Amino acid sequence: MALSVEAVLKHSSDLQQARSLGDLMRVTGAAVKALTRYRVAWVAWFDDDGKHVRIPAMTGAHASWESTPVIPRSADAMLEEIATGGHPVVVTDARIDPRTNKEQVARFGNRTLVNIPIILGGRVHGALGTGSFGDEGVVEPTTEELEALVVFGSQLAPAFDRVKALEAQERAEKQNRDLQGHLESLQRVELMGVLAAGVAHDLNNLLAVVLMSLDSIDRSKLGDDADALADATKAIDRMRDVAQQLLQLGRRESGPRATVDLVQKVATTIELVKPSLPPAVTVVQQHEGTPSVDGDAVQLEQALANLVINARDAVGVQGRITLQVDEAVLDPVSASKVRGGRAGRFARVRVSDDGPGIPLALQERVFDPLYTTKPTGTGLGLAVVSRIVEQHHGFLSVDSSPDAGTCFSMYLPAT
């Protein structure tokens, strides 16, 4: 087979048109089939650390550089020889050559192996591999085939670098789009807070009128209806409290620090959030003692509401959410087992659910701003909770496992 310069140049041109790793692999496979008698091709790419190698699968049409598995380079004697020698390595028969891994040879049926160094700027960046398998028998490359592979391999290095740069650019653009989307969500949340505060203000005024009207009724003349009037008055009082809570949550500034009874604060938070819960979701409050903290009542209610809503999203339309209030005394050993923990006496609020749990790999990121796994999430809820807890000189931990639910624990210095 005579070397066709035109054929090599054609495939080199195809490389320049490639926009992804999948494109490069398809072009490489087609080029090797056209330029040699071999049917299969692969590429090994050395990482910058010089110790690892990536081998994108030729069939991975949608593969990306970041998703390509990484393996130790030292595990392959031929790759080491190419990296250090910078010349083609041909194994006539992999079954008997001492450099080959006989277990891998038996698994894949390798016979002849041809590895061409991919060189750019005098440095070996990887290897282009091909060869024969199984019933194809030993197929030694001709001089022309080796020369064609060397010429084509020299074009792979800049093509791979360009595709890696394009992938990095696309990732940056996607991150920018995601950030813009999160900012828009944040603006919507802020707008909703302003609107809610306005509605709550008007509602508060209207409720005041209703209460004044109810108070003007002479209860002595109502007879059996007096109890109904009392119930209505209590309901209006509660509605006014809810409107006042919405007003406070809608304000940009936080309130003054004071002693906060956590048991009472958990109870009022449950009443505030309960209308947003599905009918089949049960909320249970438990407590041991009545620990108090020095803090901003509005901020703490915001943090608790976010945790309950997060638990609601986890359980879906049916489940159980438990809020437990107690006191925890941590020594240095037990504190070291809690995320951000330190020794001391703390008032603790645990919000747990019986949802599907959070994968271990994601638990370290759940408190990151703008990070979310929910299709309609903003990535703000848990980040806000974490910030509020830190402002109160406490810490927040998560304990979760698949199919075992999740528990968020707020540790606040006890007064």
Image (cartoon, rainbow, N blue to C red):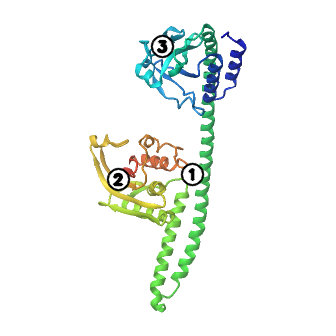
Instruction: Name which residue lies at 60% across and 65% down.
Output: 199
Q: Quadrant of the N terminus?
A: top right
- 324 relative position to 89: left or right: left
User: If you read the primary sequence from the N terminus, does the residue marked by circle 2 or circle 3 appear first?
Assistant: 3
Q: Judge the density around disc 1: few (<14), some (14-19), many (≥20) Cα neighbours within 10 Å.
A: few
Q: Identify the residue position indicated by label 3 in the image.
A: 93
Front in this rendered view, residue 168 or 291: 168
Identify the image quadrant of residue 155: top right
- Tell me whether the residue at label 2 lies in contact with that at label 3, contact meaning CB atoms closer than 8 angstroms: no
Q: Position of residue 384 (x, y in %)?
A: 49, 49
Distance of mark 2 from mark 3, alpha carbons?
68 Å
**Of callouts 2 and 1, the N-terminal one:** 2
Q: What residue sits right under mark 2 in the picture?
A: 348
In the displayed structure, would residue 284 be above or below residue 138?
A: below
In the foreground, 261 or 333: 333
- Between label 2 and label 1, give the one nearer the viewer: 1
Name the mark on residue 376: 1
Q: Which residue is at a point 71% across and 19% down the rendered structure image?
A: 10
**Residue 28 coordinates in the image, percent (x, y):** 62, 22
- Say which of 253 and 14 sits in front: 14
Image x and y of residue 257, in percent: 43, 54
291 on left or right of 222:
left
- Please name the amino acid that badge 2 sits on: Arg
Q: CA distance from mark 3 to mark 1?
A: 57 Å
SS type, badge 1: loop
